[in-house]
Structure formats: structure tokens, C-alpha cells
Amino acid sequence: MANVTLANAIQISQGAFGVNQFTVDTNGFNMTLSGVISTTVPATEAIQPGLTKNGLGDLTLTGVNTYRGQTIVNAGRLIVNGSIANTSSVTIADGAVLAGNVAIPNLTVMSGAKLSPGNSIGTVNVAGNLTLNAGSTTVIEIQGATVDKITVGGTATIAGTLQLVALGGTYQFGSPYTFLTATGGVTGSFATITTDAGFGVGVSSAVSIAGNSAAVTLTAAPLVTTAVAAATANTVAAQKAPVLGLTQRRNITAVALGLDRAVAAGADVSSLFAVYNQPMREALAAAVNTLSGKVHTATSAAGLRVSDQFLARDARSLRDRARRVTDGRRGQIIHGRSAGSEELGPRALSLDRSRAEL
């Protein structure tokens, strides 16, 4: 059978040669155990039976389980939408995944393993200590203003890769999403941060670690200039080269340059998130181009700052080129070339101050 659901209560007893692990091999299929997994071994015994998950496929536990031995996930995915709070520890091996809304005492995620809280947005509660080893992956989903959470009662030692996944909704640049809290403090850092394509090619991120928490902040990726992030011991930024570069048409380059400068100056460009949230570089360039004749209508501080970037350009060059422009659209970004001359670069572009209404 491809998928099996069992509601039976399961009791783990002591075997003839000592305490046995209850081993479930899903063998590429999916299984749900909704009954309680318990043990007949007295709590006073030093060695307790636990649960081992082998084989590809999902094993989902939905009951409030009371077994006290180790939980070991060797392969596939263990999804806990209940409790295994009495287990002595949980270890996720190379290639395996722990997911769900789970309450556990201690958690170790080995190199090559994944921790993915929730079924969409969800929470993993670790009463004791959390260890994310080098080479492990922590998957954090963000949906609108909500984010997966990992709460730790002891210490959290982090390493490996942080993988950010977009689930949709309205996002904000610059607003931290706190995804990890640890009463005993957070140490270490993620070596790599990857941003899901769902956020768009124009969206990057930075992770900050301070004391008892870790948070991720979505940032506008550099469009034509190389962003120089502040290097601190507690901040790791996803490295991203300029998305568009200087190979676009002049209007696109001018607007993109203005956006980059506005972001560098601290402007909030959240109102333009839809512009940055494009699946491909070409779509991002087209979205940026739609702003070229509309900068003067922007109502946010970010829009005003972007406009200022254009208004501040060389007035003499602007007047010379304005005489050659016949387009009467309001707020048009001016560009042109004289007979036999080369095209003007982005640094020569500007906005006609007399025709812009900000």
C-alpha cells in the first residue's frame, strides 16, 4: 500500500537482548501513526526504548507520544504534528528531514540533514538545546508578516545553510522576521543564506544574530551597483551581484541607479516590492522601466528620494538635451544623443525639474 494510516496505540517493550528501538521503515511510502506510542519499560530504567525512522517517504506522528528513548531519523522525513516531548533526544541524520509542529527535548541536525518547522508556517519547540551542525540546512518559510519559528529553552548553536522560502503575501523590506529564540543564547552563524525564487530576483536578505534571537530581514538587491554591506560579527548577508548591471537601456539604468542610491541612503522601498519581486532578470528590467515616467507620482518617501537622485544631476547637460526632446510627457526622464555622438551613460541622465511634479 502506498499510504497507510494507523490509529492503533503502540507499546514498546523490552526485548530478550535488552531494550529495542521501535523501527519504522517507510520504504518510499507515506505512513501516519495517530495512536500513542508508549513503552512498558519503567521510567526508573536507565535505558529506554525509542523510535527509529528508516527508508524514504514520510512518517507522520499526530499523537501525544510518551516513549522515552531516542528518536533517530536515518532517512526520509519525520513529520510530528503532536508531541514526542518525553523522548530523550532527537537526531536527524544525513539526508533526512524533521518537519511539523513538534515539541521535543533536545535536537541535533547533522550535516546533510534538514530542519523544516511546520507544514507551512509552523513552530518547532525545543525544551533543551538545539545544535545545527555545519552542512545542515534550516528551512524557514515566510508568508506575509508571519514566519516559521524555532523556540529553544536552552542554547542554540547554529551553522550550515539557511534556506528562505516565500509562501506569498505582502512583504516588507527592512522589517525583521524573528525565526529563532533561545533562552540560553544563540551562538554561531549560518555559512550560507539562500533566497527562494518566489521572493523574486530583486530580493536579497540579511540575518542578524543578537543575544537570544536570530532574525532575517528582506532587502532590496542591488540593481546596477555593487552593494557594500556593513560587515559585523552578528550579521550575515546573502551575497548578490548587481541583478541588472549597466547593460540595460538608459532609462532603465537611470531608474535602477536611482533606486540603488535611495536604498543605500536608507530609503524604505517596500512600496516598490512588486517591482523587485520578479521571476527573471528581464521581467525585473521591464518592471523598473515602468517607473521611468512615473517617478513624479510616487507618494512614499522612497519615491521622493528616488526622484531626488535624478533631480540632482547636471543641470547644464539636462538643458542641452532638453532642447532635443519633443516628448511632452510629464515627469519624463530625459535622454538623447547629438549627431554622431555616443549614447549618454547613466551618469549623464536626469529628470526635468521644471516638468516634474513631486
Image (spheres, helix red, strand yellow):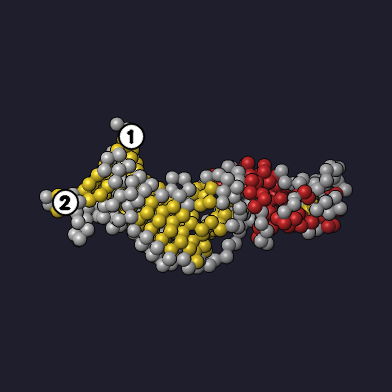
Image location (x, y in percent) of residue 339: 82, 45
- Along the viewing direction, whichever of 347 and 130 lies nearer the viewer: 130
Q: Quadrant of the N terminus?
A: top left
Image location (x, y in percent) of residue 8: 27, 40
- How much space separates mark 2 and mark 1, taking CA atoms? 29 Å
- Along the viewing direction, whichever of 125 and 340 lies nearer the viewer: 125
- Along the viewing direction, whichever of 21 and 231 lies nearer the viewer: 21
**Residue type indicated by callout 2:** Gln
**Tag 1 or tag 2, which sits nearer the N-term?**
1
Image location (x, y in percent) of residue 98: 37, 49
Question: Which residue of the protein is positioned furthest toward the right in this rendering?
Answer: 323
The disc at residue 14 is 2
Circles 2 and 1 in contact, beta carbons < 8 Å: no
Question: Which residue of the protein is positioned furthest toward the top in this rendering?
Answer: 1
The disc at residue 195 is none
- Along the viewing direction, whichever of 191 and 345 lies nearer the viewer: 191
Q: Residue at x 59, y 57 (%)?
A: 175
Question: Which residue of the protein is positioned furthest toward the left in this rendering?
Answer: 16
Can see residue 180?
A: yes
- Local crowd at mark 1 within 10 Å, few (<14), some, or many (≥20)? few
Can see residue 242?
A: no
Instruction: Identify the element where label 1 is drawn.
Output: strand
Image location (x, y in percent) of residue 329: 83, 43
**Residue type indicated by callout 1:** Asn
Q: Residue at x 80, y 58 (%)?
A: 314
Please give left or right for residue 192 compared with residue 22 in the image: right
Q: Residue at x 22, y 46 (%)?
A: 11
Q: Residue at x 29, y 46 (%)?
A: 36
Q: Nearer the viewer, mark 2 or mark 1?
A: 2
Identify the residue under disc 1. 3
